[in-house]
Image (cartoon, helix red, strand yellow):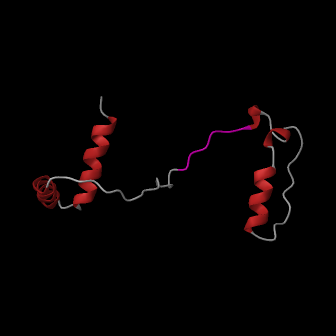
Amino acid sequence: MKKPLKLPKFKNEDAERDFWAELDLSEYYEPSDLESVSFPNLKPTSRSISIRMPEYLINRVKEKANALDIPYQSLMKQYISRGAFSQ
């Protein structure tokens, strides 16, 4: 550690945001000071999309989801995820 980082009292979120935007942490920390961390409770952000699919395919996915007792959109996400990450 190069020098201690002293945090001021912030008047509001904008003041805090400005402080962190201007701060150069390399003045306070060495790479050896850093630790790896994990945030297991964070969920990835999601956004809605539009996709055109044949009606019969949507109905087939809905039937399969109903048989599995899960929402059909969740099943579609599973299918897309498997396809995107399999090689």
73 in relation to 28, above or below = below
Quarter of the rendering occupied by the N terminus: top right
Q: Residue 2, located in which quarter of the rendered image? A: top right
Percent position (x, y) of residue 56?
Answer: 10, 55
Percent position (x, y) of residue 11?
Answer: 81, 71
Quarter of the rendering occupied by the C terminus: top left
Q: Is residue 38 magenta?
A: yes
Task: Give the camera-side residue of 13 and 69.
Answer: 13
Q: Residue 68, located in which quarter of the rendered image? A: bottom left
54 in relation to 11, above or below = above
In this rendering, position of residue 44 left or right of residue 70: right
Give the prevailing secondary structure in the magenta stretch. Answer: loop
- Residue sitting at 26 percent across and 58 percent down? 73
- Residue sitting at 23 percent across and 54 percent down? 52
Picture mark count: 0
In this rendering, position of residue 52 left or right of residue 34: left
Percent position (x, y) of residue 6?
Answer: 87, 54
Hey, which residue is sitting farthest top in the picture?
87
- Residue sitting at 56 percent across and 45 percent down? 38
Q: What span is colored magenta in the figure?
A: 34-39
In this rendering, position of residue 49 left or right of residue 30: left
In this rendering, position of residue 6 left or right of residue 12: right
Q: Is residue 69 magenta?
A: no
Hey, which residue is sitting farthest front in the picture?
52
81 in relation to 10, above or below = above
Percent position (x, y) of residue 8?
Answer: 86, 61
